[in-house]
Image (cartoon, rainbow, N blue to C red):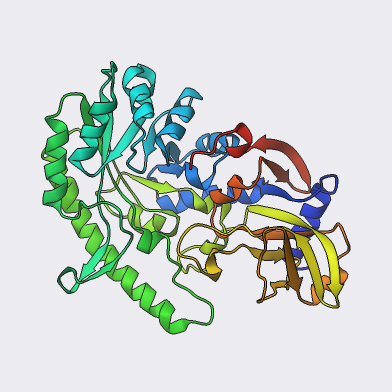
Amino acid sequence: MTARAADRARYDRATAHLDAPLALVDLDAFDANAEDLVRRAGGKPIRVASKSVRCRTLLERVLAKDGFAGIMSFTLAESLWLARSGFEDILLAYPSADRAAFAELAADPKLAAAVTVMVDDVSQLDLIDGARGEGREVIRVCLELDTALKLLGGRVRVGALRSPLHSPAQVADVARAVARRPGFKLVGIMAYEGHIAGVGDSLAGRPFRSRAIRLMQATARRELAERRAAVVRAVRAVVPDLEYVNGGGTGSVQHTAAEDAVTEIAAGSGLYVPRLFDNYTSFSGRPAALFAQPVVRRPGVGIVTVLGGGYPASGAAGPDRLPVPYLPEGLRYDPQEGPGEVQTPLLGSPADDLLIGDKVWFRHAKAGELCERFDVLHLVEGDAVTATVPTYRGEGRTFL
């Protein structure tokens, strides 16, 4: 029996009393992935990206482990909710225009002490000031650095379109604006190198593209390490008591941690290990989050149909944004239909061994987005469900 077949047998036994659709997290795999992230971080603390987890129980579980400290959130409303739930040191990874939430933040000492907001433009400070109302708490601020690799005098850009702050001088200018503005305190710098951390460099059947990606990433790592160090020096000249410099992502943990200028690493997807993280030479993890759909039809030889399953992930539309049938091994989509809203035909010889009501297990393309489809996660240890816990959605929280 292969390791994957053994996992399928465990999951089927653990959930035999549950009807699909359902989602589970294998805690043995989750914990092993957490340990691997800590090993790769080389002693630097890991700030957990909440958008990749979207379950308070599992955020608490990973933050209780040595090597993890703090949360990187994705909306201001989520940040305030987590702070009110007892989480501390929450860094909002994206600028916000949520005026009502800023008014709450500015009026509550506990929230203002726990939450740091992201800024990359002085106009964002104007928006916050205009939303304060009667609130006069000091707002903690982090600046985001653009990590994109620019070549040929800027005519070629590789990297996500995020912050407009690219050079040390640009970041230092905004740092000075924050430092001299009453009601704000600059505490950190963040830089997410998505073109390094979020792009696999070992694509099956595409050796030349894989080699090109590795060359690009090696060049980008060198350029960013030099520029990030210069940015940190420039900002520390303005704010000597900067609390942290955050960088990285699941795919670049060990590389980013090796930079002296970086004090902490951001990671989250590496806990669940969705399918987008299968194609990396620098690390491998164990799939920990899966969902099951029930077989409801057997249209013919080598074909079964499961209920639903069309859960595409965000990003540029393409086959890599689709979930994949994972267990039993050997199933594939009908190219004419793909994964559908209410039914998904699956082809392959394993279909002939599946009966009506059997479960087919899938892996989502991205990590926390799976939790937007399910109210609860069934936590599996060995071959038993040991707890059933709510996702953000299950707690009535849909932040985006």
The one of 217 and 17 positioned closer to us in this rendering: 17
Where 277 falls versus 242 (above or below)?
A: below
- Residue 226 % position (x, y): 20, 59
Q: Position of residue 94 (x, y in %)?
A: 35, 43
- Whether residue 102 is situated above or below residue 224 in the rendered picture: above
Q: Position of residue 384 (x, y in %)?
A: 78, 44
Q: Nearer the viewer, residue 297 or 192?
A: 297
Judge whether 149 appears above or below 396 on screen: below
Q: Quadrant of the N terminus?
A: bottom right
Give percent across and percent down for residue 134: 28, 15
The number of callouts visible is 0
In the image: residue 55, left or right of residue 330: left
For the residue pair 279 and 169, the one nearer the viewer reads as 169
Q: Residue at the location (68% across, 72% down)?
A: 333
Q: Where is residue 101, by image quadrant?
A: top left
User: Residue 7 lies in what quarter of the image?
Assistant: bottom right
Q: Is residue 388 left or right of residue 94?
A: right
Residue at x-position 67% and y-position 63%: 340
Q: Quadrant of residue 116?
A: top left
Q: Residue at x 39, y 31 (%)?
A: 89
**Does the image show residue 163?**
yes
In this rendering, does residue 87 appear at all? no
Q: Is residue 365 above or below residue 209?
A: above
Q: Which residue is at a point 49% across and 66% down the rendered structure image? A: 317
Seen in the image, is 358 located left or right of residue 3? right
